[in-house]
Image (cartoon, helix red, strand yellow):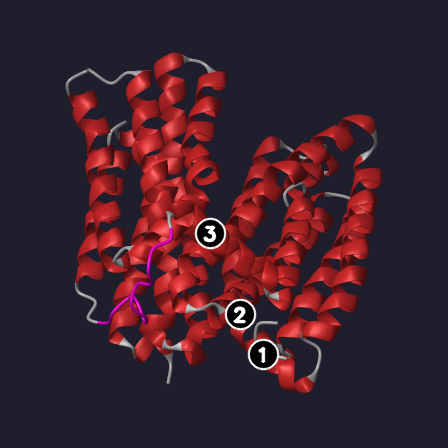
Amino acid sequence: MSVWRVRDFRLVWAGQTLSSFGNGVSQLAYPLLALALTGSAAAAGALAAVRALPYLVLGLPAGALVDRWDRRRTMVLCDLGRAVNMATVPVALAFSALTPAHLFVTGFVGGVLHVFFSAAENAVLPNVVGKDRLTGAVSAVETAQAATGVLAGPVGGALLQLCRGLPFVVDAVSFLASALCLSLVRADFRGEPTRTRDGLRAEIGEGVRWLWGHRALRSIAVTAAGLQVAISGVALVAIVAARDASPAAIGGLFAALGVGGVVGAVIAPKLKARMGLFRLLLTVVWLQAVLWAALAFAGGLVAVGVVLALFTVSMPCFGVAALSYQLEVTPDHLLGRVGTAFGLLIWAATPVGAAAAGVLLDAVTPRTTSLLFAGWVVVLGLVSTRVLSVQLGGPERRTRVTRT
């Protein structure tokens, strides 16, 4: 049965999509408003860092806490809190009382609430749709998030141009609508009763140890982080490679390529069903090695655009397959902790890749930088092929591996 025939999934999907759209609208509006208030690009950059900081600091504790708490109540309260938090910005603007400090506080509070919401949101899917339909559910969620990523930025910018407080009003309303959708879900968001609590630190450690002790999931997580190191630098490398094009053309290219994420998320379940988990994951890894080599020799904006399009299609295929597998094999009482540990590993790889790309581009040409990243992904592919062929390659193990 299709996940779309499950009433509770439609409500959860709507809630997650609305929350994602709200985040996307404010993600652009926040730094633009900070720039308008202060005239400082450094302040706008610092605000973006403040909004991202809670995941680094609170990601693992949030995973442990949402495994203790009622997950639906957590998500609803987070959405209500974010609605109130966002509403303070247009109210302060209306009274000419908005300050940079206010933006920093609301940005940090919103980041904290987002961490707890996101820790709970993926953990609920196995209980809403069942583990046999997880790939379709993850694909639907990832497709919506990719689509909102394409739409939310331009919408936020247009709303900000009309009225500086309007993006935050829309953001607040989207969170209220999300809370309403989630409150209407009938299914229990938890499949097992809460276990005896051993202390927050011990519970965090339990989730991390479980992830690291599951050999197949650990290998997938390390492979995903390795790919993230490379993919985090691809935008910068492409921009430098296509530097002869106009800024408007480059901006339009990257905006259009957001559609690639939607395509990748849509086709991922079909590819996984046809190829199996093992072959799909490794196909993405080796495809990206080839794409890095192709980027090294791409000449002109069109060629660079084709390579980037294939990058943006391939990454969701890996992500949907990896996340659905993680949700399938993780016990319910550990879903929050394992999910945040998995996500934190990938999140930590992002600045590493971006910084590496910047350092390399200062030192060598874009072609050499691309070839170095290609070499990195080739090494990753060789290791992953050897390791995952043992853990996932057998016919009976292609879609599910028990903990070892």
Q: Earlier in the sequence, mark 3 or mark 1?
A: 3
In the rendered structure, are the residues bearing label 3 and label 1 in contact, judged by CB atoms less than 8 Å apart? no
Report helix, strand or loop for mark 2: helix
In the rendering, which numbered label is found on residue 340? 3
For mark 2, what is the residue? 325
Q: CA distance from mark 2 to mark 1?
A: 8 Å
Boundaries of the magenta span: 187-198
Secondary structure character of the magenta stretch overall? loop
At 77% from the left and 26% from the top, the residue drawn is 362
> What amino acid type is highlighted by mark number 2?
Tyr
Q: CA distance from mark 3 to mark 1?
A: 22 Å
Residue 124, position as x, y percentages in the image: 34, 64
At 74% from the left and 38% from the top, the residue drawn is 241
Give neighbour class at mark 3: few <14, some 14-19, many 20+ (Cα, 10 Å).
many
**Could you tell me if residue 317 is visible in this image?**
yes
Q: Nearer the viewer, residue 27 or 222?
A: 222
Give neighbour class at mark 1: few <14, some 14-19, many 20+ (Cα, 10 Å).
some
Q: Quadrant of the C terminus?
A: bottom right
> What amino acid type is highlighted by mark number 3?
Thr
> What amino acid type is highlighted by mark number 1?
Thr
In the rendering, which numbered label is found on residue 399? 1
